[in-house]
Image: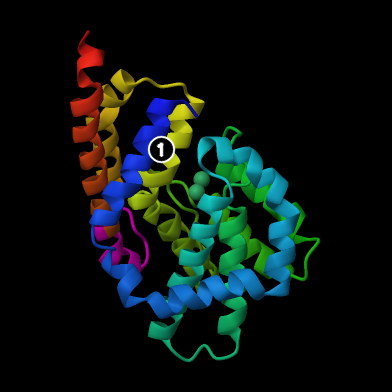
């Protein structure tokens, strides 16, 4: 990573620390903590993470490796927990559904570096999941969710309400990453990978923000629709701080 990117990445974390955390993470800290606990302690999830670790490390260079997939997994299981509580009467199956949500999050970008990564990733995930104690129906739920996780593409609906919920929760958890995570982590790996200059960043900033704003209208769960737009706005506020810093510190060299 060159020093201008390192400088911006460090500044972005500093800017992020000055903004209040989005309401979702304060309101649902119990569900997010429960989800993280399962991620680190459930034997199936531990083995699944180990099985795909090397593969995800390859995607780290474009900002979609372990850091990204772990956060998608945590928020996906937390959203499932919240939505299932609101539906009520789910009983012993809830724990199992959270495990499916974690697995979907871990695997959803397994083919991130390949074209048509959602479709290719769903097929690869199915092969991996058959090595684990998941039923064919459960594998179907996870793979459908992975296939449906791209924005601005019509999702294929599931006839099963649990399958539909896993798909919607995975989508929202992935799009939550367009908040602070995008500006504190992901964007700098992508900038580095694409060898972009400060001038490139300044020129593309407004176009990028417009694209992120469109994501805010696509959340699929009631919780995502309620709390997702604030997560996105939180990211955009950090992005604006970075833009002002860019103009102040790198603007002149771009105009030279
Ligand atoms: Fe993806
Ligand atoms: Fe993703």
Q: Is residue 196 above or below residue 44?
A: above
* Residue 110 spot, x, y in % from top left: 63, 46
Q: Quadrant of residue 50?
A: bottom right
Please name the predominant secondary structure of the magenta segment in the image.
Answer: helix
Q: Compare residues 229 and 151 and report the one nearer the observer.
A: 229
Q: Quadrant of residue 250?
A: top left
Left or right: 139, with 230 as reference point: right
Cβ of mark 1 under 8 A from ligand 2: no
* Residue 16 spot, x, y in % from top left: 29, 51
Task: Identify the residue shown where x is 56% and y is 35%.
Answer: 61
Q: Is residue 103 magenta?
A: no
Q: Is residue 223 magenta?
A: yes
Report whether residue 164 is seen.
no
Q: Is residue 58 above or below residue 175?
A: above
Task: Identify the residue shown where x is 65% and y is 38%.
Answer: 58
Please give the range of residues in magenta. Answer: 217-230
* Residue 243 spot, x, y in % from top left: 23, 34
Residue matched to label 1:
187
Task: Identify the residue shown where x is 39% and y is 53%.
Answer: 175
Q: Compare residues 153 and 36 and report the one nearer the observer.
A: 36
Badge 1 element: helix
- Pick the quarter of the image with the C terminus: top left
Report whether residue 34 is seen.
yes
Q: Is residue 30 above or below residue 111?
A: below
Q: Is residue 91 above or below residue 118?
A: below
Q: Quadrant of residue 40?
A: bottom right
């Amino acid at each position: 990573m060159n020093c201008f990117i390192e400088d911006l990445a460090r500044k972005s974390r500093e800017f992020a620390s000055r903004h209040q955390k989005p309401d979702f993470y304060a309101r649902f800290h119990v569900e997010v903590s429960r989800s993280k606990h399962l991620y680190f302690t459930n034997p199936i999830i531990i083995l699944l993470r180990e099985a795909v670790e090397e593969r995800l490390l390859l995607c780290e260079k474009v900002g979609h490796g372990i850091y990204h997939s772990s956060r998608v997994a945590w928020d996906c299981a937390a959203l499932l927990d919240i939505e299932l509580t609101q539906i009520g009467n789910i009983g012993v199956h809830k724990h199992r559904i959270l495990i499916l949500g974690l697995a979907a999050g871990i695997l959803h970008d397994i083919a991130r570096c390949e074209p048509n990564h959602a479709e290719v990733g769903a097929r690869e995930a199915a092969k991996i999941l058959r090595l684990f104690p998941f039923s064919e129906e459960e594998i179907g739920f996870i793979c459908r969710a992975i296939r449906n996780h791209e924005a601005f593409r019509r999702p294929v609906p599931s006839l099963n309400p649990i399958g539909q919920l896993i798909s919607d929760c995975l989508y929202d958890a992935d799009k939550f990453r367009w908040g602070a995570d995008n500006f504190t982590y992901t964007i700098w790996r992508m900038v580095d990978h694409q060898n972009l200059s400060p001038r490139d960043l300044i020129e593309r900033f407004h176009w990028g923000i417009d694209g992120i704003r469109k994501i805010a209208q696509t959340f699929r769960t009631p919780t995502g629709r309620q709390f997702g737009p604030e997560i996105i706005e939180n990211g955009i506020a950090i992005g604006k701080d970075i833009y002002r810093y860019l103009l102040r510190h790198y603007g002149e060299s771009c105009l030279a």
